[in-house]
Image: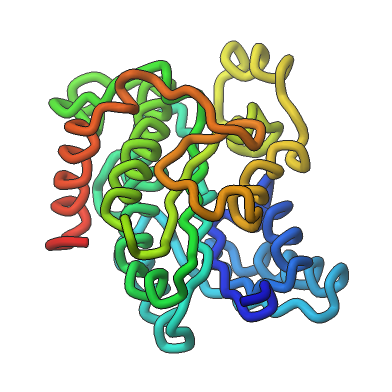
């Protein structure tokens, strides 16, 4: 099937690497379904896409990734219009520098960076399987190497730190991807994740200067940071690769904690309970 018949969902598409990936996938002919928090920004992105690719097809839906009800509503609306999903690109992410909670009362980094893609992906598994070959691509980070899953305090209620919280959520992305790949084995749906690089985006705006300044020395542009995500979304070279973490368009090493299958299984079961899902 050519890209002109394919449907892609991209989260976090209104800025940063998400915007670049949306533009690239629209140019490839994919129909884009974009859950956006800010409809004004969403409409601006749609106009930009249509200006650059006149034949592009873009649907916008209001969706808050810090609200499970909002995610469920978006998925319901998607299913009303589509029976198949060829690409789910879990790109949206946040890095909070003070502890706060989501609409559902869950620590914000964990809720938005892990539970949101976990819930959305699981709710869309039937549509992904129906579209096989299909792909799930999740944006993680090399920051995952800075921590472990603190199963005794996942939400940092006992002890919270900005870097630890963010890094744990990115570690969760990899564990989720590896466990998802096992769940989808033989279905024709692949699941991979990536480190985009230290990209100069609004993700770092909330960080204190002492943490942001060193990162600025190694930051790359959104255009460069989007390349691995685009590659995993459309390249035939990775059509049969699954459960793998990429950086610079190549499989990359993960931490020992990220390769722990027992931790992946444990996180999966805990996430099912958080999201109210009984099974995949």
The structure residue drawn at horizontal position 52% and vertical position 42%, both measured from the top left corner, is 139
70 displayed left or right of 6: left
43 displayed left or right of 167: right
Colour approach in the figure: rainbow
Q: Could you tell me residue 28's position as x and y percent? A: 74, 67
The structure residue drawn at horizontal position 33% and vertical position 74%, both measured from the top left corner, is 126
The structure residue drawn at horizontal position 25% and vertical position 27%, both measured from the top left corner, is 260
Q: Could you tell me residue 32's position as x and y percent? A: 62, 71
- Regarding residue 113, the answer to whether it shows in the image is yes
Q: Nearer the viewer, residue 6 or 155?
A: 6
The structure residue drawn at horizontal position 44% and vertical position 61%, both measured from the top left corner, is 64
Residue 228 location, quadrant: top right
Q: Could you tell me residue 15's position as x and y percent? A: 67, 51
- Looking at the image, the residue that sits furthest to the bottom is 80
- Regarding residue 205, the answer to whether it shows in the image is no
Residue 30 location, quadrant: bottom right
193 displayed left or right of 220: left
Quadrant the N terminus occupies: bottom right
Quadrant the C terminus occupies: bottom left
Q: Nearer the viewer, residue 5 or 160?
A: 5
Residue 121 location, quadrant: bottom left
Q: Could you tell me residue 257's position as x and y percent? A: 30, 22
In this rendering, the answer to whether 234 lies above or below 2 is above
Q: What count of labels does the image hold?
A: 0
């Amino acid at each position: 099937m050519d890209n002109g018949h394919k449907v892609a969902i991209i989260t976090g598409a209104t800025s940063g690497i998400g915007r670049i990936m949306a533009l690239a996938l629209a140019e490839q002919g994919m129909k884009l379904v974009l859950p956006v928090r800010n409809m004004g920004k969403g409409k601006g992105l749609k106009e930009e896409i249509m200006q650059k690719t006149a034949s592009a097809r873009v649907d916008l839906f209001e969706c808050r990734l810090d609200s499970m009800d909002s995610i469920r509503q978006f998925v319901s609306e998607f299913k009303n219009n589509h029976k198949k999903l060829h690409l789910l690109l879990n790109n949206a992410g946040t890095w909070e520098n003070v502890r706060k909670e989501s609409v559902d009362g869950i620590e914000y980094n964990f809720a938005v960076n892990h539970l949101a893609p976990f819930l959305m992906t699981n709710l869309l598994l039937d549509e992904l399987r129906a579209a096989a070959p299909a792909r799930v691509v999740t944006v993680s980070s090399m920051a995952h190497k800075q921590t472990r899953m603190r199963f005794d305090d996942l939400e940092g209620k006992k002890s919270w730190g900005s870097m630890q919280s963010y890094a744990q959520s990115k570690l969760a992305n990899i564990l989720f991807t590896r466990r998802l790949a096992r769940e989808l084995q033989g279905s024709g749906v692949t699941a991979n994740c990536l480190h985009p690089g230290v990209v100069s985006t609004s993700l770092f705006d909330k960080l204190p200067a002492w943490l942001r300044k060193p990162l600025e020395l190694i930051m790359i542009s959104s255009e460069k940071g989007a390349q691995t995500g685009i590659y995993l979304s459309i390249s035939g070279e990775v059509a049969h690769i699954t459960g793998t973490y990429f950086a610079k368009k190549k499989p990359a090493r993960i931490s020992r904690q990220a390769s722990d299958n027992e931790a992946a299984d444990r996180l999966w079961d805990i996430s099912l309970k958080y999201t109210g899902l009984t099974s995949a």
